[in-house]
Image (cartoon, grey):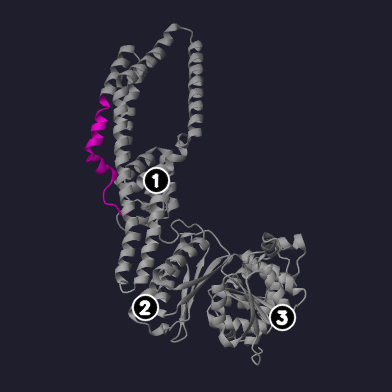
């Protein structure tokens, strides 16, 4: 794909810059990466270039960059400005204690902290996931209670070791004058904590409240999606089958059960395999759904079982499509679904003994369905074959490789 | 198939509703010689009347279908059993087959299919539902490498031939024997002989999977 450079979400190690460059220029991504690494090792310019690209190049599918968002992030900029008093105090104290290096460190530190804050606030949701997934392993120590305890132990140990180190440093230069900057530094830290602690705490609390609000908004969106998938769909089905009271009762009861299990047991009503992890389990879900929605018997036979990959989920979706088609069009009261897990592939057959059709002369509507089954299978390297003739029923044969395709 | 004589059928099921339902479905095509709703009465009556086919509910109070199989097969090996069940657990199905039943059907089977199955069993053939075919494919699925070391592998019994595998696959896909025959361009008789051979393997094989299913039901 040629065109403007976009950071690639698919081909990424850090922020997807090299992947993006590779896509825009057609140069192999490994070569691009190598160039960046060499530039970074040689003069450091590679690191700078990468960072600038990260901030100024949007992710594929997005229009704004981190930089453009950060410039418009007033609250974030105010937060950064709020750090300035701390900086000023540090400078003053450093000057008073004649420890110049403390002062010279604080400026770059301030800039870095400000940049990190702004970037973190203005990264897109996708990017936040990336950052988390890259950083979490590093910060893993804090995520669980017993890890937290080891974190405390390690911190204390580090402090003790640091203290001993400082002690030896001081002993190395046995003049009391050398103690002065250390004592001074400690004093400064203590002063900052006492003076600015509460203010910082309130800032942190603000941030937490903001995060909570965001989490709530996400939850609401997820809930809306679930209600749409389950309740609204069922209501539509009920409207359509108003003439068949028995079917309506069945639909209502199924929906009630699903809703209850969602509200009181926390099980989200799912499309196929949303919570199923194994093939046979997913087929069971499919069977129950089609039987409940279309009033047919689906006779399921599964030989072997395996974990669901993306390809196998697509296989399930395609086989549901095939089963629903059979339920709708064939007129047969029973549909056979047979799946067999082989070493390299999973084969799935959906068969009915209904009225059948001529696959070469099907109407537009059927054609579309056949295509949607075929396209779905083909996307993951699978295939679909449809066999039928008028009066002879129909059989759909689906084959999906078990191993994921390497992109 | 012995079409000339109506097969004599005996019903064993603890639900009177189900027994009368089956009676109605089979109608005049068979002669129902008796029925029973518990193990001891069933053994006594079957041994007394010696029917051609016993339609046997797998789950019965007082020992289940296997107890009846054991109580009849020793004295009257000519009596054929066809298991009917609502259960789809492989251990249940495999257990009654290994105890001597000639076939297995789920209770949701249509009257026509049931009748055909009764005739088939009466003629000494095996009856495989898609579900049973699936279980067998499952049990004989992988190369029995583990079994070679453990039990001594007998290729005659512990392995399906490619043809048998094909036949079972088609049955599992919902094909009738006739459709299987057409698809593989062989005669229905040949399909029947393949299925019977599979049944024999199912009953005699010492494959680990089968043995495990059997011990789960304390059969061995």
The C terminus of chain B appears in which quarter of the rendering? bottom right
Q: Nearer the viewer, residue A124 or A299?
A: A299
Residue A371 is tagged as none
x, y percent for residue A83: 28, 27
Chain of the residue that carries numbered disc 3 in the rendered image: B
> In the displayed image of the protein, which residue is found farthest to the top?
A176
Is A77 part of what is drawn in magenta? yes
- Give the labeled residue for mark 1: A130
Mark 3 on the same chain as mark 2: no
Picture residue at 51% right of the left edge, 17% below the top: A164
Task: Specify the farthest residue to the bottom.
Answer: B4
Q: Which residues are magenta?
A: A60-84
Q: Nearer the viewer, mark 3 or mark 1?
A: 3
Q: Which residue is mark 3?
A: B50
First of labels 1, 2 by sequence position? 1
User: Considering depth in this image, is A120 or A19 the residue closer to the camera?
Assistant: A120
Left or right of A352: which side holds A239?
A: left
Determine if the magenta segment contains residue A349. Answer: no
Residue B44 in sight from this viewpoint: yes
Using the image, determine if residue A250 lies above or below residue A108.
below
Which residue lies under the disc numbered 2?
A: A366
A357 left or right of B76 in image = left
Circle 3 residues within 10 Å: few <14, some 14–19, many ≥20: some
Badge 3 element: loop
Q: Are marks 1 and 2 on the same chain?
A: yes
Query: Subunit of mark 2?
Result: A
**Residue B137 sits in quarter:** bottom right
Q: Quadrant of residue A78?
A: top left
Which percent across, then down, holds residue A144?
47, 36
Distance of mark 1 from mark 2, alpha carbons? 42 Å
Same chain, labels 3 and 1: no
């Amino acid at each position: 794909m040629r065109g403007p450079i976009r950071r690639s979400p698919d081909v990424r190690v850090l922020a997807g810059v090299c992947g993006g460059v590779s896509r825009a220029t057609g140069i192999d991504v490994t070569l691009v990466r190598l160039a960046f690494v060499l530039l970074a090792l040689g003069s450091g310019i590679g690191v700078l270039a990468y960072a600038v690209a990260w901030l100024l190049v949007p992710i594929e599918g997005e229009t704004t960059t981190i930089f453009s968002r950060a410039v418009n992030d007033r609250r974030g900029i105010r937060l950064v400005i709020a750090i300035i008093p701390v900086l000023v105090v540090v400078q003053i104290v450093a000057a008073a204690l004649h420890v110049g290096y403390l002062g010279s460190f604080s400026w770059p530190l301030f800039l870095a902290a400000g940049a990190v804050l702004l970037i973190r606030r203005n990264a897109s949701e996708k990017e936040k996931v990336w950052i988390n997934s890259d950083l979490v392993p590093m910060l893993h120590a804090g995520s669980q209670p017993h890890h937290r305890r080891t974190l405390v132990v390690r911190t204390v140990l580090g402090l003790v070791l640091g203290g001993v180190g400082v002690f030896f440093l001081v002993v190395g230069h046995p003049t009391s004058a050398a103690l002065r900057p250390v004592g001074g530094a400690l004093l400064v830290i203590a002063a900052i904590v006492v003076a600015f602690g509460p203010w910082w705490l309130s800032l942190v609390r603000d941030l937490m409240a903001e995060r909570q609000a965001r989490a709530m908004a996400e939850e609401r969106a997820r809930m809306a999606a679930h209600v749409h998938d389950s309740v609204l769909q069922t209501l539509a089905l009920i409207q359509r089958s108003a003439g068949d009271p028995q079917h309506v009762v069945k639909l209502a009861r199924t929906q009630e059960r699903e809703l209850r299990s969602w509200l009181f047991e926390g099980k989200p009503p799912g499309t196929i395999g949303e919570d199923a992890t194994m093939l046979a389990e997913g087929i069971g879900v499919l069977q129950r759904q089609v039987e409940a929605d279309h009033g047919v018997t689906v006779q399921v036979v599964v030989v072997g079982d395996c974990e669901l990959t993306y390809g196998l989920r697509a296989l399930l979706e395609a086989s549901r499509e095939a089963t629903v088609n059979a339920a709708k069009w064939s007129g047969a009261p029973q549909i056979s679904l047979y799946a067999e897990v082989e070493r390299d592939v999973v084969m799935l057959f959906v068969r009915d003994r209904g009225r059948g059709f001529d696959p070469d002369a099907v109407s537009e509507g059927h054609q579309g369905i056949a295509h949607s089954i075929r396209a779905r299978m083909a996307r993951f390297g699978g295939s679909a074959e449809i066999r039928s003739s008028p009066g002879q029923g129909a059989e759909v044969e689906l084959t999906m490789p078990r191993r994921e395709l390497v992109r | 198939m012995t079409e000339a004589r109506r097969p004599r059928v005996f019903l064993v099921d603890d639900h009177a509703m189900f027994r009368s339902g089956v009676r109605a479905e089979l109608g005049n095509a068979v002669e129902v010689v008796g029925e029973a709703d518990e193990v001891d009465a069933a053994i006594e009556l079957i041994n007394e009347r010696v029917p051609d086919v016993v339609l046997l509910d797998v789950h019965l109070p007082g020992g289940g279908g296997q107890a009846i199989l054991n109580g009849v097969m020793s004295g009257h090996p000519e009596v054929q059993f066809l298991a009917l069940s609502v259960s789809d657990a492989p251990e249940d199905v495999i257990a009654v087959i290994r105890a001597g039943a000639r076939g297995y059907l789920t209770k949701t089977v249509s009257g026509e299919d049931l009748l055909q199955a009764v005739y088939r069993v009466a003629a000494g053939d095996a009856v495989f539902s898609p579900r049973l075919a699936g279980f067998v494919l499952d049990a004989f699925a992988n190369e029995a490498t583990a079994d070679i070391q453990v039990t001594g592998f007998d290729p005659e019994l512990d392995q399906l031939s490619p043809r048998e595998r094909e036949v079972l696959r088609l049955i599992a896909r919902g094909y009738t024997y006739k459709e299987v025959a057409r698809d593989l361009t062989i005669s229905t008789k040949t399909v029947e002989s393949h299925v019977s051979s599979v049944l024999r393997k199912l009953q005699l094989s010492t494959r680990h999977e089968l043995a495990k299913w059997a011990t789960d039901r304390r059969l061995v």
